[in-house]
Image: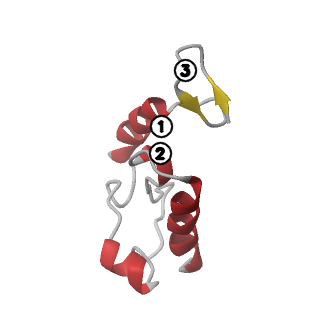
């Protein structure tokens, strides 16, 4: 993780604000409208009943794209999402 000139945290060259801006810009093109089903996430179920098609994709915001949290919380969010794939 490197610090920008303004002292904000960056990961792979993207600040939390940039990550949020990108997620909002992609939201309307995603198959799930950027919404994560929290009940399915916690139960380990898939997020969507069928896989997206025709170039569609699922968009899920984890870690600093949601709120400033520690790395461990972001890793667990990603693990929960990916285990159901």
Instruction: Work out whether 71 lies above or below 24.
Output: below
Q: Residues within 10 Å of mark 3 (few under 14, many from 20)?
A: few
Residue at which label 2 appears = 64
Residue 72 occupies which quadrant of the picture? bottom right
Q: Is residue 49 visible?
A: no
Residue at which label 3 appears = 7
Residue at mark 2 to residue at mark 1: CA–CA distance: 8 Å
**Colour mode of the rendering:** secondary structure
Local secondary structure at mark 2: helix
Q: Which mark is residue 28?
A: none
Work out whether mark 1 precedes mark 3 in sequence or the reverse, and give the earlier one.
3
Question: What residue appears at the point 47 percent right and 35 percent down from the top-left corner?
Answer: 16
Please provide percent x and percent y for residue 2: 68, 29
Residue at mark 1 to residue at mark 3: CA–CA distance: 16 Å
Q: Looking at the rendering, in which quadrant would you find the N terminus?
A: top right
Q: Is residue 64 visible?
A: yes
Work out whether mark 2 precedes mark 1 in sequence or the reverse, and give the earlier one.
1
Nearest the viewer among 9 and 48 is 9
Q: Are marks 2 and 1 in contact (CB under 8 Å)?
A: yes
Q: Are marks 2 and 3 in contact (CB under 8 Å)?
A: no
Q: Looking at the rendering, in which quadrant would you find the C terminus?
A: bottom right
Question: What residue appears at the point 59 percent right and 32 percent down from the top-left corner?
Answer: 10
Residue at which label 1 appears = 19
Number of marks present in the image shown: 3
Q: Residues within 10 Å of mark 1 (few under 14, many from 20)?
A: some
Q: Residues within 10 Å of mark 2 (few under 14, many from 20)?
A: many
Please provide percent x and percent y for residue 3: 63, 25
Nearest the viewer among 67 and 34 is 67
Instruction: Work out whether 22 lies above or below 48.
Output: above
């Amino acid at each position: 993780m490197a610090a920008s000139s303004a002292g904000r945290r960056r990961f792979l060259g993207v600040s939390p604000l940039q990550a949020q801006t990108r997620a909002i810009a992609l939201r309307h093109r995603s198959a799930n409208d950027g919404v994560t089903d929290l009940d399915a996430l916690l139960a380990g179920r898939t997020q969507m009943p069928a896989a997206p098609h025709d170039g569609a994709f699922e968009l899920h915001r984890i870690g600093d794209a949601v709120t400033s949290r520690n790395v461990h919380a972001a890793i667990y969010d990603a693990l929960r999402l990916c285990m159901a794939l």
